[in-house]
Amino acid sequence: MKCGSLRDELMEVVVNGSELASPAMQDHLATCPACVANLASLRQTMELLDEWQTPEPSPYFSARLRARMRDEQATQARSWLTWLRRPAVFTAAAALMAVGAGLLEGAHWKADHRQTVAGATTGVTVGAVGDLQYLDNNADLFSDFDALDDSQTETN
């Protein structure tokens, strides 16, 4: 058995005792002084932890902890509003929002206004359908242009 695979099982030997260890582990511990030293070190550590007494908290510990938690929660609740108190930041944010909204609305207004003006002056809707309707309504006029083109080519 290798030392690396035993290191994980050494804690179980310390907690449960050497008599409950597997026979392969007992054989390895009999032949490997490094693992025996590691086991002894773990046992000393566990004995020290068994002797250690946890200190009792002061009688006012929980009251002070609750008061500090309330203060921290109040600070966090106020912190997102602190940027509103700075006039330069607030003014810049408001101006940026106003410009953005103006650009968006201006683009929509311009597109709507073009369609309204084009429809009012010509009576034709804007787009490919409007172009086709315009050509259909003015077919006679365009046919006269074709006749003029034909007469000019014949004279030249």
Image: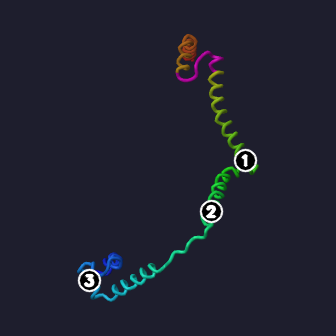
Q: Earlier in the sequence, mark 3 or mark 2?
A: 3
According to the picture, the residue beneath numbered tag 2 turns out to be 63
What label does residue 90 carry, if any? Answer: 1
- Residue range (magenta): 118-128
Q: x%, y% of residue 34?
A: 35, 87
Residue pictured at 66% horizontal, 54% vertical = 74
Q: Is residue 86 left or right of residue 10?
A: right
Q: Amino acid at mark 3?
A: Gln
Secondary structure of residue under mark 3: helix
Q: Is residue 37 left or right of residue 90?
A: left
* Residue 68 placement: quadrant: bottom right
Q: Residue furthest top?
A: 140
Q: What is the CA distance from the residue labelled 2 to the residue labelled 1?
A: 39 Å
Q: Is residue 102 left or right of residue 38?
A: right
Residue pictured at 53% horizontal, 14% vertical = 136
According to the picture, the residue beneath numbered tag 3 turns out to be 26
Q: Is the residue marked by circle 2 packed among few (<14), some (14-19), or many (20+) residues within 10 Å?
A: few
Is 111 included in the stretch rendered in magenta?
no
